[in-house]
Image (cartoon, rainbow, N blue to C red):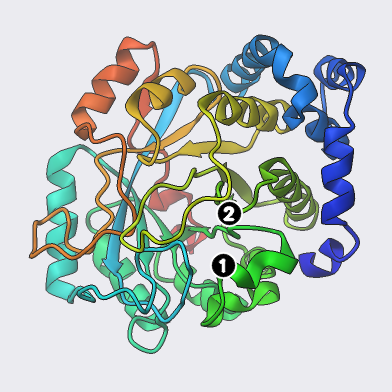
Amino acid sequence: MFSDELENISWEETTERIHAKTDADVRRALSKEHCNVEDFMALVSPAATPYLETMARLSKKYTEARFGKTISMFVPLYITNSCTNSCVYCGFHISNPMPRTILTEEEIVNEYKAIKKLAPFENLLLVTGENPAKAGVHYIARALDLAKPYFSNLKIEVMPLKAEEYAMLKEHGMNGVICFQETYHKANYNIYHPRGMKSKFEWRVNGFDRMGQAGVHSIGMGVLIGLEKEWQTDITMMAYHLRYLQKHYWKTKYSVNFPRMRPSENGGFQPNVVMSDRELAQVTFAMRIFDHDVDISYSTREPADIRDHMATLGVTTMSAESKTEPGGYYSYPQTLEQFHVSDERKAVEVDKALKRLGREPVWKDWDASFDLKAFK
């Protein structure tokens, strides 16, 4: 399990090593065809900031060699904001006085139909708060079943599950799982997650092993930029984690995300660091140079101009016209959203913008015929 590996990686020593990287270390990393985690540290370090344009050119080169000029489009659907956790930064915080919604089957189907009217979305991400008693595995399985007539690729972003539960959801059409560790800083983890199942650090970080053991086709990872001042260290820990997973579950496809904190309804928590646009670009380029094959995803948390620019330099997956409250697409009586989106363009506007930039939005890149089940 990765938690055992993480015990041998010191947060403090890693932070020191990143800030000790030199100009020579950066140039060495940039000259290599295949980078290791030490090289990644150099590329996210302050020493790499003068090389941003060089990194951008390399990132673009590797991205186009592996992905061409395509951008895979997806849409998230929040089917419940009911949650038992107390994450201090989240709008779904259990103590936040807000209406809680668990969509019914009819309401879920109406959401699917409403999404299909926005654009030819085929990649759907089902998102829930973490309330397994009221919206657990069987609720998620039913939502997947209902989605099959409308979407060809189904992913989930829910509470960490058991390996056998991931395997069961695969039987209901689930193709991928996204889970944000939020932070790999174990000593500080419970400051941000004081109560609820999410407070169990090992259970969450080892959830990726359980996904791999269940043979999940696609696994998405991420850290929440704003929790730890040393964002370079947090993302380096994710790089260690990515390499570990690729070694142990090599048949699985991986994606990464670096969401920057934005205001939520639980507005009392202020980010401990604000990552600049240049720093976001740097870590994006560093990740692409580090791993040519990993999907790099930007959500609508990021502004339109940033998303458009980075679509030509390293990003390969994007959401569009996202609603972060249950019932948001069909316009049920609105509940409060988990976070505010920044790119508020319609999906068709995003499509046109990407095409103007020479990118080709891909609305469907998975089909049931790819599943082994289809050949049984």
Which amino acid is tagged 2?
Answer: Leu
Residue lying at the far bottom of the rendered structure? 133
Q: Are marks 2 and 1 in contact (CB under 8 Å)?
A: yes
Quadrant in the picture for residue 163: bottom right
Kind of element beneath mark 1: helix
Image coords of residue 162 (percent x, y):
59, 79
Left or right of 124 on screen, residue 40: right
Residue 73 location (% of width, % of height): 36, 37
Q: Nearer the viewer, residue 275 or 114?
A: 275
Residue at (42, 28) in percent of width and height: 71
Check residue 192 in the rendering and tell me which mark sits there, or answer none: 1
The location of residue 110, given as percent across then percent down, is 12, 61
Residue at left 80%, top 35%? 41
From the image, tell me which residue sits under label 2.
Answer: 227
Q: CA distance from mark 2 to mark 1?
A: 8 Å
Tell me the quarter of the picture where residue 199 sits.
Answer: bottom right
Q: Residue at x 55, y 48 (%)?
A: 226
Numbered label attached to residue 184: none
Q: Quadrant of the N terminus?
A: bottom right
Few, some or many C-alpha atoms within 10 Å of disc 1 (few <14, some 14-19, many ≥20)? some
Q: Residue at x 34, y 19 (%)?
A: 354
What residue type is disc 1 on?
Tyr
Residue 195 in the figure: left or right of residue 208: left
